[in-house]
Amino acid sequence: MPIYEFRCEECEKPFEKLVRTFREEVACPGCGSASVERLLSTFAMSGGGSSSGSAAPMGGGCCGRGGCGCGAGH
């Protein structure tokens, strides 16, 4: 089940929601409005290569200490 990003058209707050099907009705958790817009999202991937072409080590997220796969060149 994917997590989608939405923006409420009433209160304009962005939020995420775990959605079982693409047609599932979603309401804003802040104001309860059913008038929401599905936003385009990017996929989060771990273990991608860096811009220099070398492969980064597998791992999730950035720890800020290096070896985490964030590509920051620690």
Image: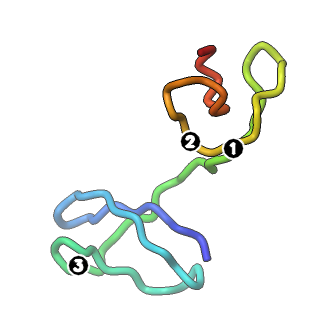
Asked whether the beta carbons under mark 1 and mark 2 sit within 8 Å of each other, the answer is yes
Which label's residue is closer to the chain start, 3 or 1?
3
Mark 3 residue type = Ser
Using residue 7 as the reference point, say whether residue 52 is left or right of it. right
Q: Identify the secondary structure beneath mark 3.
A: loop
Mark 2 residue type = Gly
Label 2 CA crowd tier, 10 Å (few <14, some 14–19, many 20+): few
Q: How far, Cα to Cα, is label 3 from label 1?
A: 35 Å
Name the residue at 19% across, 67% down. 10
Using residue 57 as the reference point, say whether residue 27 is left or right of it. left
Label 1 CA crowd tier, 10 Å (few <14, some 14–19, many 20+): some
Name the residue at 62% across, 48% down. 44
Residue 71, given in percent of the width and then of the height, sits at 65, 23
Using residue 57 as the reference point, say whether residue 7 is left or right of it. left
* Badge nearest the viewer, 3 or 1: 1
Using residue 69 as the reference point, say whether residue 12 is left or right of it. left
Q: Identify the secondary structure beneath mark 2.
A: loop
- According to the picture, the residue beneath numbered tag 2 turns out to be 61
- According to the picture, the residue beneath numbered tag 3 turns out to be 33
On screen, residue 1 above or below 8: below
Which label's residue is closer to the chain start, 3 or 2?
3
- According to the picture, the residue beneath numbered tag 1 turns out to be 46
Residue 15, given in percent of the width and then of the height, sits at 34, 62
Foreground of the two, 29 or 54:
54
Which label's residue is closer to the chain start, 1 or 2?
1
Residue 63, given in percent of the width and then of the height, sits at 51, 34
Count of number-bearing discs: 3
Mark 1 residue type = Ser
* Badge nearest the viewer, 3 or 2: 2
Name the residue at 34% across, 70% down. 36
